[in-house]
């Protein structure tokens, strides 16, 4: 008889291996990925290819690959957001993303004379820093878009395999066969 | 390892030509307990449940990873869960004019809304009117026990004799000693996890293995101890050692998915009414369950005025039926039970059944919640993440106000529910400013270093807080709906201020930096602990039921759910609902045998 508990355990172990492999591959993927369309992941469904490339870069700037774990690009955050946008029945919300991405390019042109993806890494950082400056009390369209962008990036990243297992190194959602982990409220003598 | 692999018992055919010994309306904690106790006594019982019988394991999918769900657990397009803002700014009925195909109450947890879509009612079919109220309803076999928060607490004589203590309201017609043996029975039959603390105001249960605390919680417990206050592991209505007498439930394996979802447990280590009470009752051969049965009237005999059965609609076909019984037991939840009594008007009972006192729907009370604090435990920042959430709940800080002291601003008290440590989703990400490498590292380093707790306080039972039938609005089945006349009072607002100030003080005293406080009181109803609309009492002029939850007016009518509670206490009510129902149904069976009903 299949024991569901054993299955659950082995499943998560298998997934851990997959995820670790993804983590190793991620730095390689990063090179040259900035302007190229996303290598893997779901087909773009709502955004145009340039919009998608812009979103992909923005998410990666918000949660980048670092020495500890791959970032939002490897976790396919833009693909997840695009999928949700594609199936949404709320035209207002879809419009907010389209105009938000447009506002990013607008701000980039205003400050550096070119669209975001054509700007240098330093110039991009400057644009995003400007957008994030109003985080506590967003006022301009790019500032308001930053709030939405960051919220969805965080939500998608930290619910992804990479986010949960590699970055957060989450240990739960497993069958504990013996004692629970932690400390006794009344320590045993 | 033993996990649940037992299929639910086969349903018996419903025979509406027969007169059952008892018909029970509702299948939650109260209805399930009534079915268990009465079938044990050999009575032939019919249970009516308005909702479906769900394959609940498939609904809950407790261990599903977010990334294995197409929307990371969220509801599909066209479904909408009401928010605090909507509950506050708009007026009920909240789904009126909504562009969404389905509208549900706020329950959903973070990314959990897709798991409750068949459990919660669609607000579009179930409107209500009046004052703002976040009314959470689960229409399915087992009701809200399928997703309850699991905190299983006893009441004490500080609650049952609260009027004697501070002069407000009414005492209950029972004392703790009356209920204590039944709390014990509930503990042993259903399983409860916790640590004995020997507190007079929060009596201990017959506990199974407790869950553990994590580093931050131990730190707070030690500090509170010095102040004469208690932090105890979550007293969970969960079997941690297993139950030899129940083949439908597994013991708890500390998977910990219970905290990131609306609740529920697909191996039924958490008590739910179907596997804990109803299936075993069906196995006695004395219980027949009819789901999809929307009760709309308790029928009375024209000559005697006694209850003779229940009129209901098939929830799917909308055909009308009558179920006949010698005893009628109403257990439809505090508000639905009041609604059913008020709907049951007859020449003998012109104000609704059992309502000669005029108290049905009144003295409506619950718990006020929302205020809370979050602290950062600095020494945990940057530490490797450990398994911190593999347990049915975090911790509980029992009431400490107005026991020996007298607060100037408010009477009664509150307790804190809280937790600390690492969990699957780092919710603080939304409060962490900035972006980029430093942002990502901060989120990671702080993920296990927070401790937070929120208070649940007693809302005073007041005659002026009530529900009645709306004369104009009907639900999807053509049945008049409830209209709310219910708002928090000054006592609750003063108490809420104290919750925040005291929570802050507690963390600071433990050397924990307070990084956030919530002083917002959530909409009325948010706690899902509604109580008191058909209270017990010794005086038929000011109460609806006697101490055995038996109608003063109609002796073969019992109302065994939270509507019978005289005051709300600040302790979560489910365990008390079940202990009371057990006691009343023992009495009922006894009276039934003697021919007194």
Image (cartoon, helix red, strand yellow):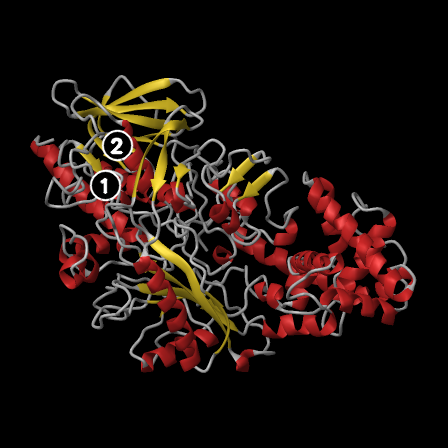
Residue B328 in percent (x, y) is at: 22, 30
Foreground pick, A56 / B392: A56
Left or right of B273 in this view: B464: left
Q: Report whether residue B209 is seen.
A: no
Residue under label 2, please give it.
B341
> Where on the picture, by quarter, is residue B50?
top left
Foreground pick, B223 / B147: B223
Is disc 1 in contact with disc 2, using a CB cutoff of under 8 Å?
A: yes
Could you tell me which secondary element the residue under label 2 belongs to? helix
Please tell me the numbered disc located at residue B507: none
Q: How many marks?
A: 2
Crowding near the residue tagged with mark 1, few <14, some 14–19, many ≥20 C-alpha atoms within 10 Å: many
Residue for point 68% across, 40% down = A90
Q: Is residue A51 above or below residue B224?
A: above
Subunit ID for the residue under disc 2: B
Residue B378 in percent (x, y) is at: 54, 81
Disc 1 or 2, which lies upstream in sequence? Answer: 2
Q: Alpha-carbon distance for marks 1 and 2?
A: 9 Å
Could you tell me which secondary element the residue under label 1 belongs to? loop
> Where on the picture, by quarter, is residue B572?
bottom left
Residue A140 in percent (x, y) is at: 73, 59
Residue under label 1, please give it.
B534
Left or right of A48 in this view: B331: left
Q: Is residue B570 above or below residue B446?
A: above
Q: Report whether residue B300 is seen.
A: yes
Residue for point 49% across, 39% down = B94
Residue for point 63% across, 67% down = A168
């Amino acid at each position: 008889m299949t024991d569901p508990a054993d299955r659950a355990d082995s499943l998560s172990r298998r997934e851990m291996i997959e995820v670790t492999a993804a983590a190793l591959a991620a730095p390689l993927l990063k090179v040259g990925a900035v302007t190229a369309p996303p290598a893997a992941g779901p087909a773009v469904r709502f955004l145009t290819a340039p919009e998608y490339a812009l979103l992909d870069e923005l998410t990666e700037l918000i949660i980048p690959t670092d020495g500890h774990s791959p970032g939002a690009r490897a976790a396919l955050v833009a693909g997840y957001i695009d999928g949700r946008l594609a199936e949404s029945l709320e035209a207002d919300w879809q419009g907010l993303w389209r105009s938000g991405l447009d506002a990013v390019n607008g701000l980039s042109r205003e400050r550096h004379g070119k669209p975001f993806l054509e700007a240098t890494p330093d110039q991009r950082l400057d644009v995003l820093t400007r957008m994030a400056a109003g985080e506590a009390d967003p006022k301009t369209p790019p500032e308001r878009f930053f709030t939405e962008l960051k919220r969805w990036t965080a939500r998608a990243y930290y619910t992804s395999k990479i986010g949960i297992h590699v970055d957060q190194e989450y240990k739960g959602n497993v069958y504990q066969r013996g004692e629970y982990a932690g400390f006794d409220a009344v320590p045993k003598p | 390892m033993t996990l649940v692999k037992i299929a639910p018992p086969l349903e018996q055919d419903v025979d509406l030509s027969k007169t059952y010994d008892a018909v029970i309306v509702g299948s939650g904690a109260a209805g399930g307990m009534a079915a268990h106790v009465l079938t044990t006594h050999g009575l032939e019982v019919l249970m009516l449940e308005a909702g479906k019988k769900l394959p609940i394991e498939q609904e809950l999918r407790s261990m599903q990873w977010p990334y294995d769900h197409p929307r990371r657990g969220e509801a599909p397009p066209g479904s909408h869960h009401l928010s605090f803002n909507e509950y506050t700014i708009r007026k009920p009925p909240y789904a009126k004019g909504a562009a969404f195909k389905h509208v549900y109450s706020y329950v959903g947890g973070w990314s959990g809304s897709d798991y409750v879509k068949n459990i919660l009612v669609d607000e579009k079919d179930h409107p209500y009117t009046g004052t703002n109220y976040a009314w959470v309803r689960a229409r399915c076999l087992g009701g809200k026990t399928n997703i309850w928060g699991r905190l299983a607490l006893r009441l004490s004589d500080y609650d049952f004799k609260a009027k004697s203590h501070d002069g407000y309201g009414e005492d209950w017609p029972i004392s703790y000693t009356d209920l204590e043996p039944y709390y014990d029975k509930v503990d042993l039959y259903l399983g409860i996890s916790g640590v004995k603390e020997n507190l007079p105001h929060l009596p201990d249960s017959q506990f199974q293995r407790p869950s553990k605390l994590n580093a931050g919680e131990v730190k707070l417990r030690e500090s509170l101890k010095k102040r004469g206050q208690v932090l105890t592991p979550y007293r969970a209505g969960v079997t941690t050692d297993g139950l030899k007498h129940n083949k439908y439930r597994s013991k708890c394996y500390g998977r910990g998915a219970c905290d990131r979802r609306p609740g529920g447990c697909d191996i039924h280590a958490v008590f739910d009414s179907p596997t804990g009470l109803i299936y075993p009752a069906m196995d006695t051969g004395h219980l027949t369950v009819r789901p999809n049965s929307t009760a709309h009237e308790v029928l009375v005999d024209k000559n005697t005025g006694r209850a003779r059965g229940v009129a209901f609609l098939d929830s799917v076909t909308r055909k009308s039926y009558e179920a006949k019984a010698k005893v009628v037991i109403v257990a439809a939840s505090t508000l639905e039970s009041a609604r059913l009594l008020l709907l049951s008007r007859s020449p003998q009972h012109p104000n609704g059944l059992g309502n000669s006192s005029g108290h049905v729907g009144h003295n409506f009370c619950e718990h006020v919640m929302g205020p809370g604090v979050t602290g950062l435990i600095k020494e945990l920042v940057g530490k490797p993440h450990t398994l911190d959430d593999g347990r049915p709940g975090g911790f509980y800080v029992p009431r400490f106000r107005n026991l020996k002291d007298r607060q100037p601003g408010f009477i009664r008290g509150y307790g804190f529910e809280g937790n600390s440590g690492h969990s699957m989703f780092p919710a603080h990400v939304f409060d962490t400013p900035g972006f980029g490498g430093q942002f990502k590292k901060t989120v990671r380093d702080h993920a296990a270093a927070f401790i937070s707790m929120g208070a649940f306080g007693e809302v005073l039972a007041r005659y002026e807080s009530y529900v009645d039938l709306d004369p104009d609005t009907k639900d999807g089945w053509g049945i008049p709906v409830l209209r709310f006349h219910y708002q928090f009072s000054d006592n609750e607002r003063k108490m809420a201020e104290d919750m925040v100030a005291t929570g802050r003080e507690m963390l600071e005293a433990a050397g924990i930096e307070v990084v956030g406080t919530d002083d917002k009181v959530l909409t009325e109803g948010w706690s899902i602990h509604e109580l008191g609309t058909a209270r017990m009492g010794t005086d038929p002029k000011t109460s609806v039921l006697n101490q055995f939850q038996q109608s003063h007016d109609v002796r073969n009518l019992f109302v065994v759910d939270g509507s019978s509670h005289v005051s709300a206490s600040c302790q979560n009510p489910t365990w008390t609902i079940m202990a009371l129902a057990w006691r009343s149904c023992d009495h009922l069976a006894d009276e039934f045998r003697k021919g007194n009903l």
